[in-house]
C-alpha cells in the first residue's frame, strides 16, 4: 500500500503533532510522516519528532526578509521531503494566499473552537464570555480566509459551572488529540466526510 506523505508544521511543543505522528506509526495507516518543520528553531516539538525518527527542519522566519521569502524556503523543504499533505499543528503564522493556493485541498489545520464560532485567538475565554453551553475543536481545510475552510471534523466538550479558560482548554486538548488523527486518517484515505466526537 502506498502511503500519503504528510508534513506537519509546528511553532511550539507540538502535542497535536505527536498525536498525529503516533497514530501514523500504525503500518495500516494510509499516511506516513515525512517531515516536521517549524518556524521557530527552539520549538520543543522538533526534538520530539526527531526522537520518533521523523526528519525535521528548522526554518526561522526571522531570518528571512519577508513572508514570501520564508514560504519559498519552506516550500523547497516540503518538496524535497515529497510532502503530499500538509498538517498545521500549532503553527502560529498566517500563510499567504499564494502559499495556501499551492496546497489547496491538501492542507489541514486544527482550531480550538466549534467553527464557525470564535475564529482567531482567545477562543476559550470568548466561549465562556458568550455563555456557551458547549465548546470544542474543529479540523478544517485551510483556505486564504483564516479559520474558514471546509470543516472535516469537530469534537464537543461541555462547559461546566466554574470553568475558566484554563480548565476549559485542559479539557479541549485531549479531544484535539483524538479528533485530528481521526480526521487525518480518513482524509489521507480520500474520505472528506466529517468526523464527530463527543466525550
Image (cartoon, rainbow, N blue to C red):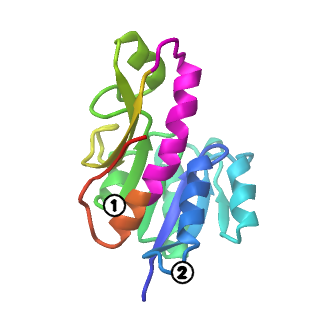
The tag earlier along the polypeptide, 1 or 2, is 2
Asked if residue 170 lies in the magenta stretch, the reply is yes
Residue depicted at x 27% and y 67%: 191
Give the magenta range. 160-181
86 versus 15 height, above or below? below
Looking at the picture, tell me which residue is in the foreground, 64 or 59: 59
Which residue occupies 39% across, 19% down? 127
Question: How far across and down, in percent of the image, does residue 179 sit?
Answer: 43, 50
The residue that mark 1 highlights is 102
Question: Is residue 5 visible to us here?
Answer: yes
Q: Is residue 66 visible?
A: no
Q: Secondary structure at mark 1?
A: helix
**Would you say residue 145 sits in the magenta stretch?**
no
Q: Is residue 76 left or right of residue 85?
A: right
Type of secondary structure dominating the magenta stretch: helix
> Which disc, if any, is residue 27?
2
x, y (%) of residue 3? 45, 80
Query: Which quadrant, please, contains the N terminus?
Result: bottom left
Binning the other alpha carbons within 10 Å of mark 1 as few (below 14), some (14 to 19) or many (20 upward) gives: few
Question: Mark 2 and mark 1 in contact (Cβ < 8 Å)?
Answer: no
Q: Residue 158 lies in what quarter of the image? A: top left
Above-or-below relation of 61 to 23 = above
Q: Nearer the viewer, residue 127 or 109?
A: 127
Q: Position of residue 67 (x, y in %)?
A: 49, 44
Residue 152 in the image, given as x and y percentages of width and height: 30, 52
Give the left or right position of residue 183, taking residue 61 as reference.
Answer: left
Residue at screen point 62% across, 48% down: 15
Amino acid at each position: 500500500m502506498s502511503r500519503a506523505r504528510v508534513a506537519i508544521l509546528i511553532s511550539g511543543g507540538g502535542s497535536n503533532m505527536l498525536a498525529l505522528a503516533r497514530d501514523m506509526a500504525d503500518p495500516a495507516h494510509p499516511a506516513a510522516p515525512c517531515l516536521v518543520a517549524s518556524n521557530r528553531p527552539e520549538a520543543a516539538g522538533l526534538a520530539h519528532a526527531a526522537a520518533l525518527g521523523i526528519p525535521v527542519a528548522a526554518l526561522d522566519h526571522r531570518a528571512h526578509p519577508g513572508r514570501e521569502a520564508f514560504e519559498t524556503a519552506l516550500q523547497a523543504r516540503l518538496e524535497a521531503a515529497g510532502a503530499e499533505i500538509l498538517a498545521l499543528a500549532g503553527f502560529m503564522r498566517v500563510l499567504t494566499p499564494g502559499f495556501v493556493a499551492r496546497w489547496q485541498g491538501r492542507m489541514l489545520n486544527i482550531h480550538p473552537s466549534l467553527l464557525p464560532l470564535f475564529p482567531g485567538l482567545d477562543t476559550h475565554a470568548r466561549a465562556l464570555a458568550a455563555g456557551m453551553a458547549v465548546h470544542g475543536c474543529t479540523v478544517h481545510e485551510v483556505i486564504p480566509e483564516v479559520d474558514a475552510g471546509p470543516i472535516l471534523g469537530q469534537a464537543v466538550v461541555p462547559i461546566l459551572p466554574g470553568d475558566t479558560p484554563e480548565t476549559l482548554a485542559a479539557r479541549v486538548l485531549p479531544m484535539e488529540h483524538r479528533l485530528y488523527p481521526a480526521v487525518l486518517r480518513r482524509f489521507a484515505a480520500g474520505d472528506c466526510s466529517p468526523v464527530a466526537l463527543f466525550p
